[in-house]
Amino acid sequence: MTARDPNHELHRAPADSTAAAGRPRIAIGEALRNNWLEIWYQPKIDLKRKCLAGAEALARIRHPVEGLLWPESFLPGVDENSLALLTEHALLATLRNWTTFADAGFNLHLAINIPSSALVKLPLAELVDQHRPKVESWPGLILEVKEDQIVRDIVQAQKIAVQLKASGITIAIDDFGAGYSSFSSLRDLPFAELKLDGSFVKNCATDATNAAICQTAIDLAHRFGSVAVAEGIESMADLQALLVMGCDFGQGMLVAPPMPRDRFLDLLRQRMNKPQPKQAGAAAEMAAPAVGRVA
């Protein structure tokens, strides 16, 4: 689904997506039965250390006739049961893929988007406890929930977040700034990340209003003992501005696009074996993309 879909997303298409309008609707259940669903990954970069910090799992459907379908082709208007099926599939696939990445030498902190309904509908803690990697090095899993969804029942969300933490699951508030939640609501919710909405990240280097919103969100995340993640970084100027503001992590088309699991793994291996420029600045290393050195 798109970044503004009310059902949330697993996940947004990149800005240059050419998903064709008018394509037939592909049901999620049908895609799962036929093994058409793919989980792609978009790198998340530590902006200060200029290295890979993790990746976000994104859903795609590869239809035998229609080809590759972005989320807006199959998520808008989907019912909660189908969303739950998709969420469970993405969760289990991401746990398996962590092991694949770890076997190749990459200990990544992976994240998936989930709709707030899945927090209640699915036994997330039980699923993770049963299927998580049984090694001490596993860093846990991040569940990203949109701000405007999670604040609808902050008491329930708080209760669930506490339960999930015992299973190594932390909550990230996604698209922060678009939901206009109160600071008091956030105070009552234990969260690991605030993800700055891409509409505010865009042009934050030149737009005073966007810059002020980004700076406020970054400062707020730090005051709550959390970290700030900028999503949708598309220009070097915005990346540099975010660094100055103290943003911790970032992702976007400038740094690295979403990609299939195997391509992501190949890229990790290539970057790990490629010598880094001795005098490369932050911008040059980010644009590489900077996914070679794992924190």
Image: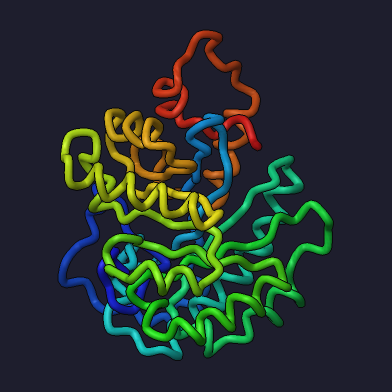
**Residue visible at 40% across and 28% down in the picture:** 287
Q: Is residue 29 visible?
A: no
**Residue visible at 55% across and 69% down in the picture:** 190
**Residue visible at 28% across and 46% down in the picture:** 201
Q: Is residue 136 visible?
A: yes
Q: Measured from the top left, where is residue 185 in percent x and y?
A: 41, 74
Q: Is residue 292 left or right of residue 1?
A: right
Q: Which is more toward the observer, 295 or 82? A: 295
Q: Measured from the top left, where is residue 273 in percent x and y?
A: 65, 24
In this rendering, the answer to whether 89 lies above or below 60 is: below
Q: Is residue 15 left or right of residue 261?
A: left
In this rendering, the answer to whether 103 lies above or below 12 is: above
Q: Which is more toward the observer, 40 or 281? A: 281
State how the image is colored. Answer: rainbow
In this rendering, the answer to whether 89 lies above or below 30 is: above
Q: Determine which quarter of the picture holds residue 90.
A: bottom right
Q: Which is more toward the observer, 254 or 142? A: 142
Residue found at the very far right of the displayed protein: 135
Quarter of the image that includes the N terminus: bottom left
